[in-house]
Image (cartoon, rainbow, N blue to C red):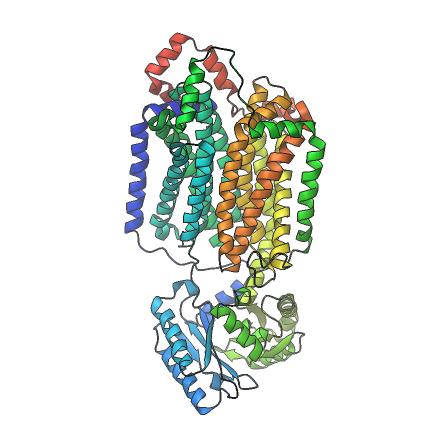
């Protein structure tokens, strides 16, 4: 591996114009393909294997044109103080709004007049129009959304308080500003780290090229592969993260090789041969984590994982080919002017000059080696304390009640809760399949009465049959809010009685609706969490065993990662569920943690954590293999890698922390969780626990049973084979290689 990458690095350096042209041509081709491709399809959000999805599919068959998964909107009206919605003037305003909504768009399926459906509160102060659409929220056209907003604005002009809730006005969150802020912070950190604008610009340039190719390819293939517009979200975030990291690693190693006195081409070859090997295997761990999302069996999540994995592959290929090509253009300008002068002075200085002053990484590693047990205990106890709140983790999916208090959706939610009860914000739909029943109407009525007698049921509407008379729907209103545990228990109670209904009436009962769908998604994610964790950590353990030729180092890496993720989840629970420091982070409403959070954090953070692990520990392994003592190898790894890993982590924390400022609670939670996880993993696990454990283990850390050593492939990540080959090459052989480096590459 290292030998091949060394030759590839030298080839790219020598043929830099050709290599750069290939990548620019590829970017142009996929860019044109994306520009000329038809619009990407919207997500048909399906959850195979769940009862809610089975009910939706049944409704599509039995109620053709019923748009079971169509968007909905609630236009909520409140009368001025001392008035009622049933007053003639107020009633006329609502009636006019109903007519306006019906005529607003061809996508409108139905508009329910509150005075005919009974959607007026008992005290008469509140009413709402329920509007259903033929398309889901992501497929709604602007005309339909504009018509909805205009109807509300006209009604408000009459003096009524009007708010609009539901998912019809749902829009994809815009993250463009956050990405720009993240890139700007990255540029500052890189400039400080390298002290050179050229060196700082290379990782940013190549990361943007990689993301550009990845996102353009997703857009160009969207229609062919059924990729939605949301698929690129994760791909963009991960692509930027790993693209900057991988380029940072190789540029840093190139500078180190130049510092040791090697000419630029040889430095580029060695940088790609050593750091490039680490990049390849770090990339593989990220790909495993992202492709592993298929275990959850949620089609949209699977597509997002595969698309992001493709972007990571592109980032790896760019790092080992385009980076050395661009280094060929940059040469020694990857150093600032002062650093270049010092480099020239060192090259002309007599041997035996003053030694280089130890950097911060060296001093920290020596400190840990003096007190490994104390550092390990402090780090583990600290992360353990942060993880304690995770024991109280409650998972769910957010509804409009978790929106900011100032938002229109939240105000509509609160108005319905006050006027009708919290359960009206998320009614359950019970689908009754009466094909196997002798008395369809009698069966539906019996089921309605039984459900009406369950705990936490505020009301059940009469059965509404389809034209064939073989399927009915019941709307069940809970006494509790949609995201509450009580509503989840109610769904479970109705489903528990399905067997009883089947045996007594011959009818099959299914529970669906947005609230039930959210509950099923949460359950599916919970069920998939352990298999996903075992798959990702297990495969990565095997991969790291091949990389490090050790059993204990990969085990330590996996356990450290789990500790950092659980600690980050504990921090998320403390802030977003318990409300600690809620004001500081702008959390207006506490509640259950988003169901996708644990799996999402495992997938994203695992990839980034293994990046830092591979780069930092590979350098230690390289030093150990080349003859250094275990403790000395740890110091060498930190001398060369700590600064780079710190810079990479600071960049990622800054990018993720930018999302904390979002008004969307879900995005805020993701940003906080990922930023905290990277903080814990990079600065506590990789910078404290890793050197402490390696110091305590000594040579045992690199132990591998002989039978396993023979069974595992030797990929030479640390470059031992490369070093022996270079040392065995005589001057004549080296000159021949320099004269025709392409011949070396073509023989591989």
Q: In the picture shown, does residue 553 fall above or below 44?
A: above
Q: Position of residue 76 (x, y in %)?
A: 48, 77
As drawn, is 142 to the left or to the right of 278? Answer: left
Tell me if residue 339 can be seen: yes
As drawn, is 54 to the left or to the right of 153? Answer: right
Of the pair 487 and 730, the residue shown nearer to us: 730
As drawn, is 605 to the left or to the right of 175? Answer: right
Quadrant in the rendering for residue 636: top right
**Image quadrant in which the C terminus is located:** top left
Of the pair 185 and 148, the residue shown nearer to us: 185
Residue at the (68%, 56%) spot, across then down: 392
Q: Position of residue 351 (x, y in %)?
A: 49, 10
Of the pair 701 and 208, the residue shown nearer to us: 208
Q: In the picture shown, does residue 166 fall above or below 244?
A: below
Q: Position of residue 261 (x, y in %)?
A: 44, 17
Q: Position of residue 98 (x, y in %)?
A: 40, 81
Tell me if residue 474 can be seen: no
All told, the count of numbered labels is: 0
Quadrant in the rendering for residue 344: top left
Residue at the (48%, 28%) spot, across then down: 275
Of the pair 289 and 124, the residue shown nearer to us: 124
């Amino acid at each position: 591996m290292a030998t091949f990458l060394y030759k590839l690095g030298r080839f790219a350096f020598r043929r830099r114009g050709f290599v750069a042209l290939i990548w620019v041509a590829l970017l142009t081709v996929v860019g044109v393909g994306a520009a000329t491709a038809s619009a990407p399809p919207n997500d048909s959000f399906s959850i195979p294997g769940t009862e809610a999805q089975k009910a939706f599919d049944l409704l599509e068959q039995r109620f053709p044109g019923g748009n079971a998964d169509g968007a909905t909107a609630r236009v909520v009206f409140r009368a001025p103080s001392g008035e009622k919605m049933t007053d003639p003037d107020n009633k006329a305003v609502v009636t006019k709004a109903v007519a306006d909504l019906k005529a607003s768009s061809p996508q409108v399926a139905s508009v329910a007049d509150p005075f005919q459906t009974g959607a007026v509160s008992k005290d008469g102060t509140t009413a709402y129009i329920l509007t259903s659409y033929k398309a889901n929220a992501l497929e709604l056209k602007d005309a339909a959304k504009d018509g909805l907003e205009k109807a509300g604005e006209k009604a408000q002009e009459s003096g009524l308080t009007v708010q609009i809730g539901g998912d019809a006005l749902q829009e994809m969150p815009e993250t463009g500003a956050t990405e720009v802020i993240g890139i700007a912070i990255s540029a500052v950190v890189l400039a400080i780290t390298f002290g050179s604008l050229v060196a700082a610009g290379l990782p940013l340039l190549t990361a943007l090229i990689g993301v550009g190719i990845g996102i353009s390819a997703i857009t160009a293939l969207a229609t062919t592969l059924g990729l939605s517009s949301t698929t690129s979200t994760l791909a963009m975030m991960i692509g930027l993260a790993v693209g900057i990291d991988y380029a940072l690693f190789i540029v840093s190693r190139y500078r180190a090789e130049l510092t040791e006195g090697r000419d630029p081409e040889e430095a580029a070859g060695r940088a790609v041969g050593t750091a490039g090997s680490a990049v390849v295997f770090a990339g593989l761990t990220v790909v495993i984590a992202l492709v592993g999302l298929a275990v959850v069996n949620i089609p949209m999540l699977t597509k997002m994982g595969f698309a992001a994995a493709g972007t990571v592959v592109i980032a790896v290929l760019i790092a080992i080919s385009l980076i050395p090509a661009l280094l060929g253009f940059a040469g020694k300008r990857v150093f600032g002017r002062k650093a270049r002068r010092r480099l020239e002075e060192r090259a002309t200085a007599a041997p035996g000059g003053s030694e280089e002053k130890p950097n911060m990484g060296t001093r920290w590693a020596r400190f840990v080696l003096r007190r490994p047990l104390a550092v390990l205990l402090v780090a583990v106890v600290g992360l353990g304390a942060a993880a304690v709140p995770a024991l109280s983790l409650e998972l769910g999916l957010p509804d409009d009640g978790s929106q900011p208090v100032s938002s229109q959706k939240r105000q509509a939610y609160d108005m319905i809760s006050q006027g009708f009860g919290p359960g009206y914000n998320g009614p359950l739909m019970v689908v009754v399949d009466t094909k196997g029943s002798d008395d369809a109407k009698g069966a539906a009525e019996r089921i309605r009465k039984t459900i009406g007698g369950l705990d936490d049921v505020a009301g059940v509407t009469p059965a509404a049959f389809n034209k064939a008379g073989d399927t009915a729907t019941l709307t069940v209103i809970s006494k509790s809010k949609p995201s509450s545990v009580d509503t989840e228990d109610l769904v479970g109670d109705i489903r528990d009685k399905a067997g009883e209904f089947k045996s007594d009436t011959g009818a099959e009962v299914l529970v669906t609706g947005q609230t039930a769908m959210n509950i099923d998604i949460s359950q599916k994610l919970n069920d998939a969490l352990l298999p996903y964790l075992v798959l990702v950590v297990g495969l990565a353990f095997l991969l790291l065993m091949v990389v490090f030729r050790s059993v204990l180092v990969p085990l330590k890496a996996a356990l450290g990662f789990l500790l950092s993720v659980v600690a980050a989840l504990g921090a998320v629970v403390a802030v977003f569920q318990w409300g600690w420091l809620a004001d500081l982070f702008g959390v207006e409403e506490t509640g259950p943690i988003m169901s996708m959070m644990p799996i999402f954090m495992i997938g994203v953070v695992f990839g980034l954590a293994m990046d830092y692990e591979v780069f930092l520990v590979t350098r230690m392994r390289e030093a150990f293999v080349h003859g250094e003592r275990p403790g000395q190898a740890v110091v060498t790894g930190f001398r060369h890698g700590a600064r780079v890993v710190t810079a990479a982590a600071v960049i990622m924390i800054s990018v993720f922390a930018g999302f904390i400022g979002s008004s969307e609670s879900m995005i805020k939670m993701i940003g906080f969780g990922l930023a905290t996880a990277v903080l814990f993993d990079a600065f506590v696990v990789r910078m404290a626990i890793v050197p402490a454990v390696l110091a305590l283990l000594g040579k045992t850390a690199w132990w591998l049973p002989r039978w396993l050593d023979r069974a595992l492939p030797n990929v030479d990540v640390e470059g031992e084979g490369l070093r022996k080959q270079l040392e065995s090459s005589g001057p004549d052989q080296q000159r021949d290689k320099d004269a025709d480096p392409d011949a070396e590459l073509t023989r591989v």
